[in-house]
Amino acid sequence: MMRCAAAVGRLLLRSGIQTHKRTCALISSFHGSEVASALNLHTSSILSQVPRMNMAPDVEPNGLNLKTQIVKGDLSSLSPKVQRYLLECVSVCRPDKVYICDGSEEENTELVKQMVEEGMMKKLPKYDNCWLTRTDPADVARVERLTFISTRNKKDTVAQPKPGIKGILGNWMSPEEMEQALSSRFPGCMQGRTMYVIPYSMGPVGSPLSKIGIELTDSPYVVASMRIMTRMGTKILKALGDGDFVKCLHSVGLPLPASRPVINGWPCDPEKVIIAHLPEKNEICSYGSGYGGNSLLGKKCLALRLGSILAQREGWLAEHMLILGITNPEGKKIYVTAAFPSACGKTNLAMLIPSLPGYKMECVGDDIAWLKFDQNGVLRAINPEAGFFGVAPGTSDQSNPNAMAAIQQNTVFTNVAETPDGGFWWEGLEKDIPVDGQELTDWTGKPWTLGCGRPAAHPNSRFCAPLEQCPVVDPLWQDPQGVPISAIIFGGRRPQGVPLIYEAYNWAHGVFIGSGMRSEATAAAEHSGKVIMHDPFAMRPFFGYNFGKYLEHWLSMEQRPAAQLPRIFHVNWFRKDAAGKFIWPGFGENSRVLDWIVRRVNGEDCAVESAAGYLPRPGSINVDGLGEVDMEELFRLPKDFWQEEVEAIGRFYDEQLPEDCPAEMRRQLDQLRERVEKMS
Ligand code: GTP
Ligand code: SPV
Ligand code: MN
């Protein structure tokens, strides 16, 4: 390690980066042995261990690419720690240019112009400042099987499954294997490209709950997206000072000249994708994919995977949850969070327009919540993000008018279809299928007509829009203290057996309900088909540490002195009838379910006990003006279904957590089994 770091130092001093005039500041702050000793710090990046032998011979003998220039910004604007990280990554990835992002409008305009010229983006002239990107069809979603967390001790990261069973609660890799995996990917990966430096904050700038990351990426699309999804630019460097930050390195994995054909102007390396988390180094390295949670490293990588580890250590929660403000007809306001798996309705619930008169719903966040008890025992939540990265298909003026309003300007669309007049289109945009004979351009760039048998938009096509463009953004959405949470809602896509809503009997029962969550697979990741998968707490792809320990952490909230624990609920908008149609109309009508939750939070006696939990007393869901809905079927609990559910949860614990399942979860399962056996 000593030898290696010193070697990096020597390489840095010989590097072409110092030949450029803007590097004077660097030269004055880093000299000789200082560089080497700085790199010896245990905080140095994993890349300081990457052997230099792997460098492509064509850029030797200088060791580094002589052409590296800083084309925007000043190294002196970066703290010594950021400079050090940048130089390490430059020395390994060897970009031609370094571009330090300031986050300004002008910068964005410049990058968008460049992407248009390069064929990576095109304008959607029907709207103001809206853009369309088509990805390589091999890079369309999160890749869970290539997402790893590397720690010394495997059990810190993943629970040991039963022998012969594959763990489904995260992928671990040893530090040695990880070093190998990164060494065979990152050296020289940015040749011919520009490395963008993105300083960003997850959470309001300066909030005690916020965390700062520095993402180095060779994708201008990532820069444009991070500018929407996070607080980004020069102001973050000021807030950071000389503090620590999460090191985030991202490369599309296609140095120039490209060794494989670039499809749709979207460089990537699908065969070699890796999304690597190194919690012990506070570092993320992502290679080969440019899309979504694979490349916008603040989102799932920092805010959930590394976030959940920090949360466990520091006594808070980092969760895959929307945050919603609800004001009832009497003018009383509460906030709730809801955890549904990917593509199961968070964005929609986060900004719903209530069908029930007198209600007002306001949006704090649609995907991630960081929750922490304050000194009075109130659980407070912030949204670490500043934008929506929302599923496009199914979004319409009927289903989600607020999202539609939010995406009319300053929005980046990916993998949606395009209309001849320069608009976007996707399945479900219009109520009764559309576009009367028009020929569209589908998400792959091919002509498309209705009935041609292919979807026009990819099922995981997305819009990326600033949160503040949402017409119902909550006035406290940027409050550094966070908003007080009165209820936590779990849910998923359950075509059978699971009622529209039920309430946990107590906190531990609520944790049990979260642990047993299951849902139909969606297009947000690589899983195909409609299989029902375990997705505890909607966090299966996002746990940063051993799920057994995560359960203990949730259970421990009850022990916190004076903690005012929110009530816990479970909802299911997706129950189907015998003909396979959704029974519940969903969307704005979900306000009827939220109304029941609000009344429970306010202490109303409107529940009855059942095997699953408290159910609404018959007649206590407000159905005024709802029309024909089979409420009885929506709440029916078939005994055989629940027997199977008990078996499935038990099997899940046995197979996935044979050693790490908290005793309380087993106790809860036994109690559920007893209640189910008493059912008629
Ligand atoms: P991620 O961004 O992947 O975490 O997804 P999400 O949980 O935010 O899901 P989103 O709200 O984007 O919804 C995904 C899909 O579910 C969309 O096609 C929606 O139209 C559909 N959907 C959302 N809410 C409802 C509902 O109440 N009923 C029905 N039937 N579909 C819904
Ligand atoms: C999800 O899959 O839960 C998302 C989309 O929110 S991504 O950012 O790709 O993770
Ligand atoms: Mn999500």
Image (spheres, grey):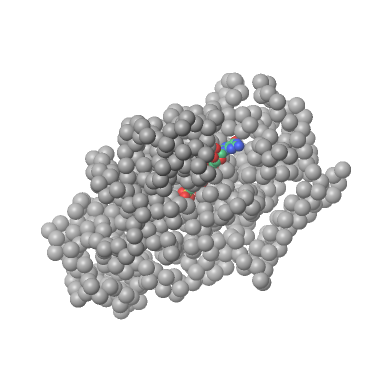
Percent coordinates x, y for residue 417 in the rendering: 43, 40
**Residue 598 location (% of width, % of height):** 63, 31
Residue drawn at (71%, 63%) of the image:
654
Q: Is residue 459 above or below residue 528?
A: above
Tell me if I can see residue 378 in this picture: no
| Residue 101, horizontal then vertical, whole percent | 27, 49
Give me the residue at 84% from left, 49% from top: 677
Q: Quadrant of residue 625?
A: top right
Residue 373, percent across and down? 54, 44
Numbered circles on residues, count: 0
Closer-to-camera residue (447/126): 447
Seen as rendered, the residue at the extreme left is 21
> Is 321 located above or below residue 627 in the figure?
below
Judged left or right of residue 201, residue 496 is right
Figure check: 608 above or below 143: above
Residue drawn at x 20%, y 51% as measured from the top left: 72
421 vs 77, left or right, is right
Residue at 60% in and 61% down: 168
* Most foreground residue, 409 or 502: 409
User: Which residue is nearer to you in this view: 288 or 455?
Assistant: 455
Viewport quadrant of the N terminus: bottom left
Quadrant location of residue 271?
bottom left
**Residue 354 in view:** yes
Q: Is 287 placed left or right of 360 in the picture?
A: left
Q: Which residue is farthest bottom? A: 3
Quadrant of the rendering where the C terminus is positioned = top right
